[in-house]
Amino acid sequence: MEHNGPAIWTNWGRNQSFRPTQIVKPASEDEAVELMRREIRAGRALRVAGGRHSFSPIVETGGSLFDLSDTGCVWSVDTDKREAVVAGGARLSTIGQPLWEAGLAIANQGDIDAQSVAGAIATGTKGSGLTNVSMSATVTRLSILNGLGEIVDIDASRPEWLRAGQVSLGLLGPVLRVGLQVVPAYYLREELVVMSWQEVCERWDDLLASHHHFSFWWMPAERSHEMYRLPRTPKDHCFVKLLHKVPAEPSVMESAEPMRRVGRAYQIYPDGTTDAEFHELEYMIGSSDAREAVEVIREMMLHRYTDEISPFQVRWQKADDAFISPQSQRDSTSLSVSGEIGRDYWPFLRAVDAALAAFAPRPHWGKINFMDRARTDAVYPLLDRFVEVRRNMDPQGLFLNPYLAPIFL
């Protein structure tokens, strides 16, 4: 076990820092349970740090902060049921290979795989694609240490609790193990293409329907691509990411053309981003409103906020049933922009927030947002059902923090 007294914890974007009473890194799941129970029974607050990849103050605690990255990786694989049980603290980057060796894979992933599994599902991490759900929606079971120090096993036999646990922001307690519905292993062919805004608009529906993954970054300025370290993309053009499932080995399918890769799915999804040079805001809206909302933000950036160079990313997800998932009961399109580190980007991000208000936006809870209880109530009709489970799991409120308590107390 690694144990540090009061020390400053900082996220990857360097915009969130706090000093917990201690930072503890247990060497095993059993040790983690023992140490966390000690804190819980003493009535002391605690939170778990994942991969540091949130831009919001979601990790902050006035008590102990636990790092569960050494408590396991893939615990079991059931090839008949296509289910894998993995450690909550395992990094996404570590589970692809063991699953592949069992002939299985995650159904869909996002652009980054440095997050912990529990952190990724807690905040609703997702990729893109008209028929692809978020990773949270593939959760089949959870083992959680609740606010009474009890290990609670949740699966489909407790549907209300499972729907609360699939996206929980860590509010039900530290997640020890996660069951994931997985799929047969598959290869992906990636195409990275620069298109004009007009071409993207004309091909929008076809690109969505004909690809496993379709997403794009629209560029408001000539140097916008530099912010995300993307290939050069002219102003008012889009850098488009397309992923196709392919049946063959990379050695057979590999193309020598630039900006194309073929490989195992878990190797192709991540785009290699490791350092944050921006602070990101992301909201999900109903997919039926996507074209209108995208045009609203595009016009705003072209004419009102001409100094902001943030690429504007657009992605899609299928609806799910989790109570506080951004995709809850609604096919969704995610819209994200960022502020440059070192600049006063708050007026711009607040303007984006205001511009999207008419579209009933739901936040990525791990990114910058301006939600309060009233706004959350308005866009999450199942919020009260989540709060009821949260109170049952954590009656003392040990897992709440200043960011989450005003909304979920």
Image: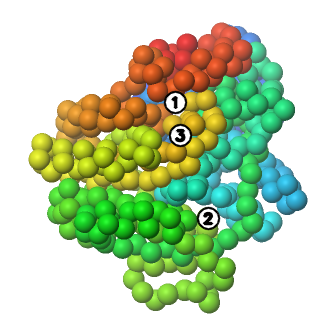
Residue shown at 85% from the left, 60% from the top: 79
Residue tagged 3: 330
Q: Please tell me whether mark 2 sits on a helix, a strand or a loop.
A: helix
Q: Quadrant of residue 147?
A: top right
Q: Quadrant of residue 329?
A: top right
Which of label 1 and label 3 is nearer to you? 3
Q: Which amino acid type is shown beneath numbered disc 3?
A: Arg
Cα–Cα span, label 3 and label 2: 27 Å
Q: Please indicate, yes or no, whether residue 133 appears anywhere in the rendered image.
A: yes
Q: Which amino acid type is shown beneath numbered disc 1?
A: Val
Q: Please tell me whether mark 1 sits on a helix, a strand or a loop.
A: loop
Residues packed near mark 2 inside 10 Å, few (<14), some (14 to 19) or many (20 plus): many
x and y, in percent, of residue 259 in the image: 41, 77
**Count of labels in the image:** 3
x and y, in percent, of residue 298 in the image: 23, 50
x and y, in percent, of residue 296 in the image: 24, 44
- Above-or-below relation of 212 to 110: below
- Residue 163 placement, left or right of 383: right
Cα–Cα span, label 1 and label 3: 27 Å
Q: Please tell me whether mark 3 sits on a helix, a strand or a loop.
A: loop
The numbered mark at residue 193 is none
Q: Are marks 3 and 2 in contact (CB under 8 Å)?
A: no
The numbered mark at residue 266 is 2
Q: Earlier in the sequence, mark 3 or mark 2?
A: 2
Q: Are marks 2 and 1 in contact (CB under 8 Å)?
A: no
Q: Which amino acid type is shown beneath numbered disc 2?
A: Tyr
- Above-or-below relation of 53 to 157: below
Residue tagged 1: 59
Residue shown at 45% from the left, 75% from the top: 191
- Above-or-below relation of 312 to 196: above
x and y, in percent, of residue 306 in the image: 12, 48
